[in-house]
Image (spheres, rainbow, N blue to C red):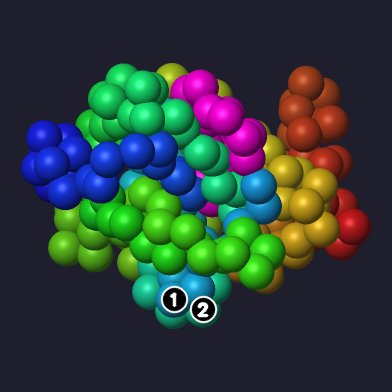
Amino acid sequence: MTLDRFAARLPAGDLWIFGYGSLMWNPGFHYLRKHPARLFGFHRALCIHSTDHRGTTKQPGLVMGLAHGGSCHGMAFLVPREQVAVTLLELWQREMRNRSYHPRLLDVRIGSQAVRALAFTVDRMHKHYAGNLPAAEIARRVVACRGQRGSNIEYVLNTVSHLRSLGVRDGHLAAVLSAVRTLDAKSERPKAESAMFAEASWADER
């Protein structure tokens, strides 16, 4: 969906935005406040090929999308109405470069309150959709890939760290990091990477 079409469907006023990956710890836009939130009907998954931010065309990484089923803990940000237009433009440039997401307004829970929030769900028909990959294959990809915004494993670890600060353990990411630990036990890493992989070794157990 184009930005103009989506913006035309928005009600006037402030806008809630639901972050479940890098938007949680690096939103990149101005907001009035943020709250831990939960979305039902979708779950977080490393299921989208990244050929720029966390990988390359020759060695695609994996980034997160919202896939159908289950639920997803994340962070909800309230953007003031006067900032909605510029925030949407920035988000489209960041999240919709390859059109691998469907931007949608979904009900998310903030405590006992339900709010409508913009969330980016995966487009399962897009060529960058990776499907439901085994944890071992995801681990092999994330330890090897790097893109314009850094390494793929750093992206995963930052997300896990932020969720842990909210008291949330994500089973999918824990399985991936367990597989990373298995891979690391079989490999010799440069010293410069030792701290990062040590973090991966324990992040899923804390």
Q: Residue furthest front?
A: 13
User: Which part of the image, by quadrant, shows the C terminus?
Assistant: bottom right
Element at badge 1? strand
Q: Residue furthest right?
A: 206
| Looking at the image, residue 176 lies above or below residue 63 | below
Magenta includes 171? no
* Relative image position of residue 35 (x, y in whole percent): 65, 47
Q: Circles 2 and 1: CB distance less than 8 Å?
A: yes
Residue, x 68% and y 38% (percent of image)? 158
63 or 81: nearer the eye? 81
Q: Is residue 23 visible?
A: yes
Q: Which residue is mark 1?
A: 41
Residue, x 57% and y 30% (percent of image)? 32
Dot label at residue 60? none
Is tag 2's residue or tag 1's residue first in the polypeptide sequence? 1
Classify residue 152 as left or right of residue 17: right
| Crowd tier of the residue under label 1, counting other residues whose Cα lies within 10 Å: few below 14, some 14–19, many 20 or above | some
| Looking at the image, residue 89 lies above or below residue 182 | above
- Which residues, given as a range, are shown in magenta? 19-34
Q: Amino acid at mark 2?
A: Gly
Q: Amino acid at mark 1?
A: Gly
| Looking at the image, residue 43 lies above or below residue 149 | below
114 or 183: nearer the eye? 114
Residue, x 78% and y 21% (percent of image)? 192
Q: Which residue is mark 2?
A: 70
Classify residue 25 as left or right of residue 182: left
20 or 50: nearer the eye? 20
Count up the numbered dots: 2
| Crowd tier of the residue under label 2, counting other residues whose Cα lies within 10 Å: few below 14, some 14–19, many 20 or above | few
What's the distance in space between the residues labelled 2 and 1, CA to CA? 5 Å
